[in-house]
Amino acid sequence: MAKKKTELTDIKLEDAYNAVKTLKEKFTKTEFAVIIETNKQNLGGRISNNGSLSFDEAKLLLKYLLSEDLSDNSFYKELSQTVNPIKSRNEIKEVKSSDNSDFAELNVRGNVGLSCGYGTVVYNDNVTGKCRVPHQTLREYGASVSSTEVVYAQGDSMSPEIKSGDALLVDTSQTDIIDGVVYAFNYDGQPMCKRLQKIGKGIKAISSNPLFDPFIIDFTCQFNIVGRVVGFMRPIL
């Protein structure tokens, strides 16, 4: 079962502070406390008691490392996996059948085509239906039941990983970019589906199909993350 962001992580506060200190010259506990939105006295007490980062604090620390261009290190990757756990080398998983009769009804945006190619229409269409998916499946993928919806892939740039016509499960609550993860996003007025990678302060969009070249996001164009693609559904023909 996915952990709630208010729960504690397995990362000790002292280890987290020391990890950032090795990355940031003259980094102090006061600065660390400000980043995770506490005070030095509280931080000191929790460190003395061998306390751990909460999920909210881990997310704040992750954002700080991104803002300081400190994402190319093992501690950042550990934080990323903690905040947004990705299984099996970040590969998207196909929805499995479940014996659990507890299903979630997800909104379907049937008129939206997430481009697995060169882009289609703007991601602003109304809900066109509902899709029932086992709660257990969503929990296994670390997806929010209330924030996950279904849209459709178009094109073959993400093939064979994602094929045109696949119904994609998009968790709109997961908008912080984790290296190597597949996201749905709007770019220059077009909804797209690509694997994203942080390159310094830039972002590279990567297709699974080697015939499609990766490209760097141009921040002078409209760009926003819709959500993480956590899985997909595909009919067997």
Image (spheres, helix red, strand yellow):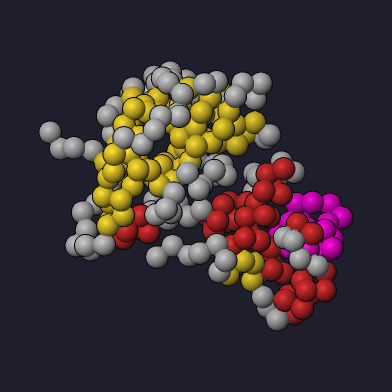
The answer to whether residue 224 of the structure is visible from this angle is yes
Q: Is residue 201 above or below residue 81?
A: above
Q: Is residue 49 above or below residue 192?
A: below
**Where does the image place residue 181, in percent across and percent down from the top left?**
48, 41
**Where does the image place residue 100, in percent across and percent down from the top left?**
23, 63
* Number of residue marks: 0
User: Magenta residues: mostly which secondary structure?
Assistant: helix
Position of the C terminus, as image quadrant, is top left
Position of the N terminus, as image quadrant, is bottom left
**Where does the image place residue 5, in percent across and percent down from the top left?**
55, 62
Q: Nearer the viewer, residue 167 or 80?
A: 167
Residue at the image point whose x is 74% and y is 61% from the top: 37
176 with respect to 128 (left or right): right
182 with respect to 224 (left or right): left
Residue at the image point whose x is 35% and y is 43% from the top: 107
Residue at the image point whose x is 59% and y is 62% from the top: 55
**Where does the image place residue 182, in percent across and percent down from the top left?**
45, 38
Q: Is residue 22 magenta?
A: yes
The answer to whether residue 18 of the structure is visible from this angle is no
- The picture quadrant where one finds residue 83 is bottom right
- The picture quadrant where one finds residue 153 is top left
- From which residue to which does the magenta span run? 17-33
Looking at the image, the residue that sits furthest to the bottom is: 49
226 with respect to 129 (left or right): right
Q: Is residue 136 above or below residue 13?
A: above
Q: Is residue 57 magenta?
A: no
